[in-house]
């Protein structure tokens, strides 16, 4: 266990980030209500068969998305981003130009971000003169509303406490974040793509299944041990974790916001040589 200093009360920049997150959530909720794409239907027998065989339910790379809906959502997101930071202007112009010149295909971007095709993202970032983080963030924001809709129809039909795999039972993604449940301290993993939560062992790496306690540890921010980062020295991966038992009674466990709020922990982990492909922030 290691502690790091530097994780302080919310700064002005973090307050701006929270306002941005809330605006993006507002647009996402509106977009979900407007989505007209066909939902995937899987009967209960097939769900039970797949989960028994440790198979996740949906491969989002294969779904067909509503392109007009994606375009509307893309433009709404850009309008929001314009209002938050002046320096966003250059990034937004490059994204708009890429879309207008057919260099940026929104559906392909969403699917490449979902499977983290680093080769594609690197090439597109170079072509548009952007950072991979910019593209990852955009692809995540565009895909998440749809993926949540699909998952919402299925996750309630899965016994997530019995899944105990390091990947999402609905879409197969690795976790972006986790929390220690208030009632029993059980570790719950969270998929930022479809919003699914599921149980996993506390003393096991969700990425490589390592259980060697000599190579598993965590660090926390000095003065705030409710936010931890669990790291594996075998696969060099990390997952940020919130101890819900140490949260305030009225504090909302919004993992989307908590993921953004704890970017300092991503910075510390990546600086020490650990990675998490589901972190849109990188040093």
Image: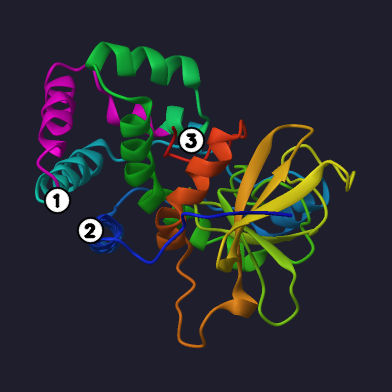
Q: How far from the left and from the top, in percent, is residue 252?
A: 45, 77
* 183 over 215 or under it: above or below: below
Label drawn at residue 114: 3
Q: Which SS type dominates the magenta stretch?
A: helix
Label drawn at residue 84: 1
**Could you tell which of marks 1 and 2 lies nearer the N-terminus?**
2
Side (left or right) of 205 relative to 27: right
Residue position for label 2: 16
- The residue nearer to you, when weighing 60 against 48, is 60
Label drawn at residue 149: none
Q: Within the magenta stretch, is there residue 100?
A: yes
Q: CA distance from mark 2 to mark 3?
A: 27 Å
Q: Which residues are magenta?
A: 85-110
Q: Residue at x 74, y 54 (%)?
A: 1
Q: Secondary structure at mark 2?
A: helix
- Residue 246's quadrant in the figure? bottom right
Q: Within the magenta stretch, is there residue 256?
A: no
């Amino acid at each position: 266990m290691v502690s790091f200093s530097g994780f302080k009360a919310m700064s002005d920049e973090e307050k701006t980030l929270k306002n941005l997150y809330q605006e993006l959530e507002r647009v996402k909720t509106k977009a979900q209500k407007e989505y007209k794409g066909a939902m995937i239907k899987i009967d209960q027998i097939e769900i039970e068969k797949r989960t028994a065989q440790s198979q996740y339910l949906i491969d989002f790379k294969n779904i067909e998305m509503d392109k007009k809906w994606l375009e509307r959502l893309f433009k709404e997101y850009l309008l929001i981003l314009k209002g938050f930071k002046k320096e966003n202007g250059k990034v937004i112009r490059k994204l708009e130009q890429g879309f207008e010149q057919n260099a940026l295909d929104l559906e392909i971007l969403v699917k490449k971000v979902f499977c983290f095709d680093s080769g594609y993202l690197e090439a597109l970032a170079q072509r548009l003169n952007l950072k991979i983080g910019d593209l990852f963030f955009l692809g995540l924001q565009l895909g998440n509303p749809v993926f949540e809709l699909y998952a919402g129809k299925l996750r309630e039909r899965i016994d997530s406490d019995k899944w105990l795999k390091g990947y999402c039972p609905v879409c197969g993604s690795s976790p972006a974040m986790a929390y220690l449940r208030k009632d029993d301290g059980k570790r719950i993993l969270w998929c930022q793509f479809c919003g699914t939560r599921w149980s996993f062992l506390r003393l096991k790496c969700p990425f490589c299944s390592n259980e060697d306690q000599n190579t598993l540890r965590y660090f926390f921010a000095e003065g705030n041990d409710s936010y931890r980062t669990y790291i594996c020295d075998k696969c060099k991966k990390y997952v940020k974790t919130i101890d819900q038992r140490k949260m305030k009674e009225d504090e909302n466990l919004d993992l989307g916001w908590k993921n953004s709020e704890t970017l300092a922990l991503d910075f510390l982990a990546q600086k020490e040589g650990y990675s998490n492909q589901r972190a849109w922030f990188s040093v």
